[in-house]
Image (spheres, helix red, strand yellow):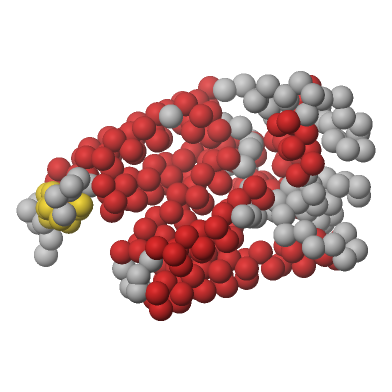
Amino acid sequence: MHTDEEVLRVSAEGEGQSEVPVRRVWPALSLVLALALGLRLGYVVTRADGLVWDDARHYDRIARNFLQGDGLMLDEHHRVERPPLYPLFLAGIYLIDHHLHVADDLLLARLAQVLIGGATVLLIWWTARRLFGHRSALCAALFAAVYPFFVYYTGVLLSETLAIFLLALATAALVETWEERALQYPVAAGAALGLLCLTRSSFLLLTPLLVVVWLLVKRPRKRALLESVLVSVIWVAVLVPWTARNYLVTHGRFVPGTLTAGWSLYEAAGPGADGGPRMERVEWSQQVWPRETSA
C-alpha cells in the first residue's frame, strides 16, 4: 500500500542517489504539465484557421489523397516527396472526425498535437530525472513547456511536434537502455528512431552514428553489441516497408527517405539563403514544387 511517505528514487546532481518524496515531485510536475497544456491549448483555439505553409498544405493533401485511395503522394509526379508518418497521423485524425464529427478536422489535428506536446514535456522530465536529478528535471520540463517554438509548432500542421516527441521517446529509451539490462528498451529505442525517420528523413544518419558511439563507449562490449544489434534491426524493420514502396514507385531506386534533399539544400544554401524558411519565396516551377492556396 503506497502512502504519502512513499519515495521516488532520483539522481541528485553530483551526489549519486537520493530520495525525494513523491508528494514533492508530482505537484510541481503537474503544474508544469498544466502550464504546457494550457499554453498550447490557448494558442491552438485562438489562432487563425487555415494552412500557412506550403509544407502544411502538402501534408494535408497527401493525407486526403490517402483517404481517397490514391496513396501517400501529392500527385502523379510527386510520389516520394514527404515521409509517410505525419500524413498517416493526419489521415487518422481526419478519419476520426469523419465518423464522429467532433470538431473541424484541422482543429482536431491541432488538439491532438497539444496532447503530443504535453507527452513530450513528460518525456523530457523523465529523461532529465534519470540523468541529472529532480531539480534539473523540473527545470528542463519547464523550459520545454514554455519554449516558444514548441508551442508554435503545436498549432501548425507540420511534422515538428510529432518528430520532437519521437526524438524525446528515443532518447528516454536509450537512457533506460544505458541504465537497465531489460531488452525492451533497445527495442523501443529502435522503433522510435525508425518512426522518427519516417517523420523527418533528415534523421536517417542519426541511428548509424548512435550505434558507432554506443559500441565505442558502452561496457561491457558484449552487452553493447547486443543492444546495438537490437536497435539496428528494429530500426531497419521499421524502414523496410516505406523503402520497398519507394523502390516500386520509383522503378528500382533505393530511397529510404524522400526525394526532397535537393529542395532543402537549395533552400539552405542557394542564392538568397538567409537561414530561415524561404520555400514560398523561391520561384519554383509547379513541376518541382507544387503550390496550393491556403485551406
What residue sits 57% from the left and 72% below the top?
233
Quarter-wise, where is residue 285 in the image? top right
What residue sits 84% from the left and 51% below the top?
79
239 and 102: which one is in front?
239
What residue sits 43% from the left and 29% below the top?
147
241 and 204: which one is in front?
204
**Coordinates of residue 251 in the picture (x, y in percent):** 90, 63
**Coordinates of residue 116 in the picture (x, y in percent):** 48, 45
Furthest residue toward left: 5
The answer to whether residue 265 of the structure is visible from this angle is yes
Q: For the image shown, how many numbered marks are present on the structure? A: 0
**Coordinates of residue 138 in the picture (x, y in percent):** 27, 39
What residue sits 65% from the left and 47% below the top?
202
Q: Is residue 173 above or below residue 228?
A: above
Furthest residue toward front: 216
Q: Is residue 208 above or below residue 26?
A: below
Quarter-wise, where is residue 33 in the image? top left
Q: In the rendered view of the protein, which quadrant contains the C terminus?
A: top right
Q: In the rendered view of the protein, which quadrant contains the N terminus?
A: bottom left
260 and 141: which one is in front?
260
